[in-house]
């Protein structure tokens, strides 16, 4: 089997990551505590707690912004501590659409995103 037609991406395209923790009114306190603790333990940048859908996110969310070097430890910690919260994790490559779709991964049930608001820059 030949792989001549496959184009592999260079990981140096990734300038960082976002993890978006999804929640609703009943889980807001749990999500806020999770994000604040992640910020303390891993020195990640904790965004605002949005109590409405923002950007492509279909529900309330809080963003954690982090570097490639923090990826393994933060995601391992989130896997153990998310307590049923849904988390979207995606790299930052400059192509918002691919970052939120092709390159994204989920902890918990994947959600339908509002993709129309994303740029397709490469």
Image: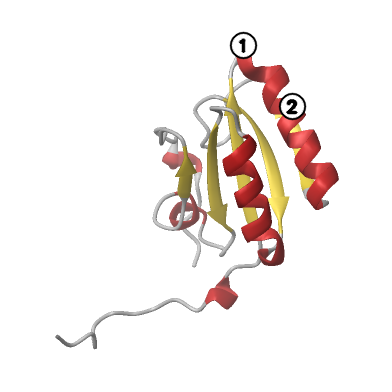
Return the disc, 1 or 2, that comes first in the chain's sequence. Answer: 1
Residue 115 image position (x, y, % from top left): 43, 41
Q: Is residue 70 above or below residue 26?
A: below
- Kindly identify the residue that appears in the image at 64 percent across and 59 percent down: 71
Name the outermost residue toward the front: 80
Q: Is residue 99 above or below residue 61?
A: below
**Near-viewer residue (73 or 69):** 73
Q: Is residue 119 above or below residue 35?
A: below
Classify residue 20 as left or right of residue 109: right
Classify residue 15 as left or right of residue 43: left
**Near-viewer residue (19 or 79):** 79
Q: Residues within 10 Å of mark 1 (few under 14, many from 20)?
A: few
- Callout 1 secondary element: helix
- Kindly identify the residue that appears in the image at 23 percent across and 85 percent down: 3
Scheme by which the image is coloured: secondary structure
Name the outermost residue toward the top: 26
CB contact under 8 Å: marks 1 and 2? no
- Callout 2 secondary element: helix
Residue 113 image position (x, y, % from top left): 44, 36
**Near-viewer residue (14 or 72):** 72
**Near-viewer residue (24 or 82):** 82
Residue linked to disc 2 = 32
- Kindly identify the residue that appears in the image at 61 percent across and 45 percent down: 19
Quarter of the figure that contains the N terminus: bottom left
Residue 116 image position (x, y, % from top left): 43, 40
In which quarter of the view is residue 37 placed?
Answer: top right
Residue linked to disc 1 = 26
Total number of numbered labels? 2
In space, the residues marked 1 and 2 are separated at their CA atoms by 12 Å
Number of the label disc, if any, that sits on residue 95: none
Residue 87 image position (x, y, % from top left): 55, 38
In which quarter of the view is residue 30 placed?
Answer: top right
């Amino acid at each position: 089997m030949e792989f001549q037609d496959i184009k592999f991406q260079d990981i140096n395209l990734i300038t960082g990551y976002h993890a978006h923790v999804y929640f609703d009114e009943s889980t807001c306190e749990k999500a806020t505590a999770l994000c604040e603790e992640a910020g303390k333990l891993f020195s990640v940048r904790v965004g605002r707690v949005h109590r409405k859908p923002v950007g492509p996110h279909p529900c309330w969310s809080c963003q954690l912004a982090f570097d490639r070097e923090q990826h393994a430890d933060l995601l391992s910690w989130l896997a153990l501590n998310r307590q049923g919260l849904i988390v979207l994790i995606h790299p930052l490559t400059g192509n918002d659409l691919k970052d939120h779709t092709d390159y994204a991964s989920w902890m918990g049930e994947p959600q339908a995103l509002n993709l129309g608001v994303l740029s397709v820059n490469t």
